Image: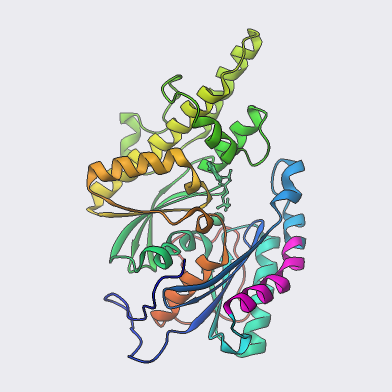
Amino acid sequence: MPRGSREACHTGCAAYPEGVSAPLVLGIETSCDETGVGLVRGYDLLVDAVASSVDEHARFGGIIPEIAARAHLEAMVPTIERALATAQVTLDEVDAIAVTAGPGLVGPLTTGAAAAKALALGLGKPLYGVNHVIGHAVVDELVDGPFPERVMALVVSGGHSSLLLVDDTVHVTELGSTLDDAAGEAFDKVGRLLGLPYPGGPHIDRLAREGDPAAIRFPRGLTAPKDQARHATDFSFSGLKTAVARWVESRRDAGEEIPLEDVAASFAAAVADVLTAKTIAACRREGVSTLVVGGGFSANSQLRDMAAERCAQAGIELRIPPIRYCTDNGAMIAALGSAVVRRGMPASPLDLPVDSTMPLTQVLV
Ligand code: KG4
Ligand code: ZN
């Protein structure tokens, strides 16, 4: 997947002179249940190594932070070693360490930050504590090249659904977010309701492909005219989740069979409809012609299909990285690290605190 070498940058940032290679950035991500280690030079991805503890959480029906933190501790050194070996580089060649400082689960974040601090201290290299949600968007620079001056980013996952205006890759304005459940969280809750294994998101996606999206008209949260004034760029999925629960319960109470495919398709269509309609309206309002979609939920095929169709109609360039770069990974943290280093932003202190609720407007600690 690495693209051809590209060290020069678009306007507004320091390009590296001819013959001087961009710094090699090691990125560490541990905000949830994936231990991700990526190596990026400029816009080129050398390696993206991931170890996941997702299977260890399945029987609990959700992520258990203590289990995730312990799994990160066990996976950290082997994953770093695997990344270095695959990229055929040594630790001495690394120029900077980037790590997720937040948002995420405190225990898992702390494990990754401790590893990054130890590396930075031991190697005498600068440390950059970066924002994992912004990383979900910026990873796309490794795939589709440098961002234009201004992009709209829709970051959707199990933990966040955020609409962001991104200037020069590292300056973020938060336009809106979910008022309750994140998109992936809503899928996982509906998955549980339908008796599907955790995480339910991919299972609903699969069922939805076999069903009729127009079979049941589920509500579209915060799309009524009265919501336009205050919540044009916010999302809400908990009412939709409750509507699905009511619909399923009433059929079960009546002893009727649940048409799982149609429920999944109608539910997925409601989520994709709201996400794409609000995002494209925001692009139009802000005069932005490039949309980047990232985060674990951007693996969702109903969202991908509807976004592709509606962006084409609206004349908006749509950039969605391949699925493996949408879920949590180290490449996205190395990509964002590379972007802040390229702009000469100051390194973080070695005692950088992790922040489980790190504001999305803060790209770097
Ligand atoms: O970004 P991510 O790996 O972890 C968080 O930071 O949350 O996202 C995982 C979320 C889960 O809720 C999962 O069910 C959802 O993304 N997800 C999907 C699909 N693949 C992953 N939801 C719907 N359709 C999918 N294909
Ligand atoms: Zn994430």
Residue 19: x and y, percent?
37, 92
Position of residue 251 in the picture relative to residue 221 (left or right) = right
Quadrant housing residue 11: bottom left
* Vertical arrangement, residue 255 with respect to residue 207, above or below: above
Residue 365 left/right relative to 141 = right
Which quarter is ligand 2 in? bottom right
What are the residue bounds of the magenta stretch? 71-87
Q: Where is residue 339 in the image (x, y as percent from the top left)?
A: 42, 74
Residue drawn at x 72%, y 72% as measured from the top left: 78
- The residue lying toward the viewer, choosing from 178 and 218, is 218
For the residue pair 202 and 245, the one nearer the viewer reads as 202
The percent coordinates of residue 318 (x first, y second) are: 33, 52
Q: Which of 59 and 229 is in front in this view?
A: 59
Left or right side of 144 for 128: right
| Residue shown at 33% from the left, 91% from the top | 18
Residue under the point 45% across and 35% down = 271
Q: Which of 178 and 71 is in front in this view?
A: 71
Q: Is residue 331 above or below residue 63?
A: below
Q: Where is residue 257 in the image (x, y as percent from the top left)?
A: 62, 13
> Is 73 colored magenta in this rendering?
yes
Furthest-top residue in this view: 254
Please report the residue visible at 46 percent of the width from the left and 55 percent of the height from the top: 322
- Would you say residue 249 sits in the magenta stretch? no
Position of residue 353 relative to residue 299, above or below, is below
Residue 245 visible, this orientation: yes
